[in-house]
Image (cartoon, rainbow, N blue to C red):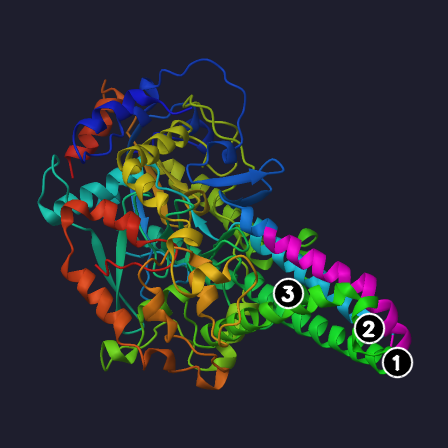
Amino acid sequence: MLQLGVAEPMRECEYSQISTRSSTPMETPYKKRTPKKRKWQAFPGRNKFYCNGRIMMARQTGVFYLTLVLILITSGLFFTFDCPFLSVQLTPAIPVIGGVLFVFVLGTLFRTSFSDPGVLPRATPDEAADLERQIDVANGSSSGYRPPPRTKEVVINGQTVKLKYCFTCKIFRPPRASHCSLCDNCVERFDHHCPWVGNCVGKRNYRFFYMFILSLSFLTIFIFAFVITHVILRSHRQGFLNALKDTPASVLEVVVCFFSVWSIVGLSGFHTYLISSNQTTNEDIKGSWSSKRGKDNYNPYSHGNIFTNCCAALCGPLPPSLIDRRGFVQSDTPQPTPPTNGITMYGSTQSQSHMAAATPLMQSEPVILTDEASLPGRTSLGGPCSGALPLGGQPTPPTSTPNLSCDNGMLPTRNDHSEAHHHFLTPEEAPSPPGMLPCGSPLGHSHTIQGFYNPASQDSLHEDSVRGLVKLSSV
Amino acid sequence: MATEFHNLQELRQSPSLATKVFIQRDYSEGTVCRFQIKFPSELGSRIERTLFEDTVKTLNTYYAEAEKVGGQSYMEGCLACATAYFIFFCMETRYEKVLKKISGYIQEQNEKIYAPRGLLLTDPVERGMRVIEVSVFEDRGSSGSSPSSNVSSGISQR
């Protein structure tokens, strides 16, 4: 699918201009008719698609299946072994409420995992070339050496925000967007990459993610409470040990729920804080809007009060997917297809954009691969995360940290720093991020990295630094 | 300003693209979808400033309507949450409805205003909502230059 004819010259030097010559009508060599392909089949990111493009997930989905299995088994055992007793002894409302919660949890889990998180499509070659020209004019540089990092400053509601240029996607990232190196996509309002749901969490699926962890908290607490109740009621009749012998499944449920409650409830609390202050996990970890950064530093996206922030995040409009997974890739002939609104003319740009987007990936692939070798958080992370991964959570104190680290799986050095970083925060504490106060070290860390910045390795630093969560470069 | 192209159909049948102009996003009000109203100099000779700026302003109004956090979006959000988001399988969201309106508006603008001037607007949704792409076609009256040299001459003019 990739046409290497255009890519070859690009291997010779580190950086070169984007050629748009091949996007003109006369020069396409691709005359023969190829069968129509759907856009998901030519998608340049590292995602997996199912059901002919309807379902979109990250490449590694093993942990998602673990999540699913844990939920299904625990709930299944509850409905099979505990509910009959409880519905007779107490009330039939218990299985009903449990059922509703269970359906809600699964529904939101699937929505989070299967939907597009807000991936930004990569720039077409014409767009990329136009940007290059503008940047060259601004820098006065010529091709042939790696250009300095590209940033653009905008003032948003009185706060200066730097927009960074993404070398992979060839766009200036909108504010709050970030590039997920696991999925190799820029994602709007990027929160984090969550292995537990097997997808990035971004603008389009953040509310589903939040409702998932919230409802899962309720479900976990619900099951935990009623399994304990069940065992206690049985114990009154026949003694504790006999009760356990009669309902061995309850023991497993209690164990799973006990370990899950800490991490999931903690994570819900953390995200409640984030929603009420209108921040992303990314911004919170970096302390982007912390008053520690400066007296005048404030969050320009916050609506000012908790209620509006919550409503906007959870009940705001849901933007549609920008990547049109199930559309057909335009054929490479320049002849226009029947008009819709004049947008279908430049079919050659479709596959060209994939070529143009793919080539920097080829250049930087060795970097990605070597970094990815150390990525899987389960083995390379020390501290709280490695233990927490196999189950829903270990008996750590009620912080969200284990899941933070685990959700991102790639904070090799930050675990120690972020351990004390986040506490179980209630919405009342929302406007100021108290988690910042005890913890000077993450900021110190990022400042150190800033000092190391080297333009020549920006691309590899870029790939390293956007491991789903933290951009250490702080360029 | 010559009006060589009589309608959109003619324009599409003989694509002799000179260059493309990109109108970037305006982030001064946050992450809401808004495009810069700055009139690009490359279009100076092709279309009146006011016409172009009106188009962009109308598009901005449409996007603001789509992204408005208000009564209707709350209703939609709460209803969707109450049904565990299954309702999204059956229902078109307000944003999608507005995007369809925008498509129709761009089509209409292309037919009435831009095609007669040798220009073509691309719906921003096709470009990831990053830019409004304005394709500038060469004047049919100009002699003999091939499209590839037109593109390069278009580039060198910058």
Residue type of the residue flagged with mark 2 = Ala
Callout 3 crowding tier (Cα within 10 Å): few <14, some 14–19, many ≥20: many
**Sequence order check, earlier mark of 1 and 3:** 1
Which residue lies under the disc numbered 2?
A243
Which residue lies under the disc numbered 3?
A256
Magenta: predominant secondary structure element?
A: helix
Element on which disc 1 rests: helix
Specify start and end residues of the magenta stretch as a single range: A66-91
Q: Is residue A83 magenta?
A: yes
Q: Position of residue B6 (x, y in %)?
A: 41, 31
Residue drawn 59% across the image and 44% down it: A55
Q: Is residue A267 magenta?
A: no
Can residue A223 be seen by looking at this rendering? yes
Q: Position of residue A255 (x, y in %)?
A: 65, 67
Which residue lies under the disc numbered 1?
A237
**Sequence order check, earlier mark of 1 and 2:** 1
Q: Are marks 1 and 3 on the same chain?
A: yes
Residue drawn 43% across the image and 65% down it: A384
Q: Is residue A40 left or right of residue A153?
A: right
Quarter of the picture containing the C terminus of chain A is: bottom left
Element on which disc 3 rests: helix
Q: Is residue A38 left or right of residue A419?
A: right
The extreme bottom residue here reads A428
